[in-house]
Each structure stands twice: as structure tokens, then as C-alpha cells.
Image (cartoon, grey):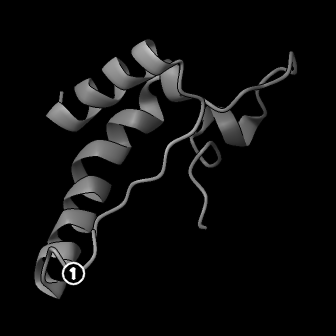
């Protein structure tokens, strides 16, 4: 499991987090190449784990999951 997923789980447990935003740039602290690499690594290594993890599943409000949800086509990940 990627360290980022482990850390997210710890933060969720400690702060009772319901949402998070992945920020890859802090006031010019990284170059464009470093930001791009960070985003790609998150997308390739962290997001697939999160998408399969029940802890990060979208709330269903009691409704059964749709066929698309079961296939992994939808979920909590959406463009800003």
C-alpha cells in the first residue's frame, strides 16, 4: 500500500475527515516537472488503491450501488 494511502487513512481516523483535496504545489515550491510527476504518481499509484477501498467509497445514502458503481465507473473522484 502506498504511504500516501496509509497517511490518508490516519488523517481520516484522527480528524474524522469526509473530504480531501490533493494539492501538489505550494507557492512556487516545486518546478513544473516536479508537479507533473507528483500528479502522475498520485494518479497511478494512489488513486487505484483509493478507488478499491471501502473507506473512500462515495456515500450511498442507503441506496444500493448502481451497476456503474459496481464496475468502478463512478465514485468520489471528480474534476474540480
Q: Does residue 39 lie above or below 45 as drawn?
A: below
Rendering coords of residue 75 (x, y %):
63, 42
- Residue 32 occupies quadrant: bottom left
- The N terminus lies in which quarter of the figure? top left
Residue sitting at x 60%, y 30%: 18
Q: How many marks?
A: 1
Q: On the rendered structure, is 47 left or right of 29?
A: right
Displayed quadrant of residue 46? top left
**Which residue sits furthest bottom?**
32
Q: Is residue 34 left or right of residue 23?
A: left
Q: Which residue is mark 1?
A: 28
Q: Residue at image x 40%, y 35%?
A: 50
Q: Residue at x 36, y 60 (%)?
A: 23
Q: Which is nearer the eye, 80 or 47?
A: 80
Would you say residue 2 is visible in this rendering?
no
State left or right for residue 45 relative to residue 79: left
Residue 76 x, y percent position in the rendering: 61, 43
* Disc 1 crowd, CA 10 A, few/some/many (<14, 14-19, 20+): few
Q: Work out whether 13 lies above or below 56.
A: above
- The secondary element bearing badge 1 is classed as loop
Which quarter of the figure has residue 5? top left
Amino acid at each position: 500500500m502506498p504511504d500516501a494511502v496509509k497517511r490518508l487513512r490516519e488523517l481520516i481516523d484522527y480528524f474524522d475527515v469526509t473530504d480531501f483535496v490533493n494539492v501538489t504545489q505550494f507557492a512556487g515550491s516545486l518546478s513544473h516537472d516536479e508537479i507533473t510527476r507528483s500528479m502522475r504518481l498520485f494518479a497511478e499509484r494512489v488513486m487505484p488503491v483509493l478507488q478499491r477501498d471501502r473507506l473512500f467509497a462515495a456515500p450511498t445514502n442507503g441506496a444500493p450501488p448502481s451497476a456503474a458503481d459496481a464496475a468502478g465507473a463512478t465514485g468520489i473522484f471528480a474534476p474540480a
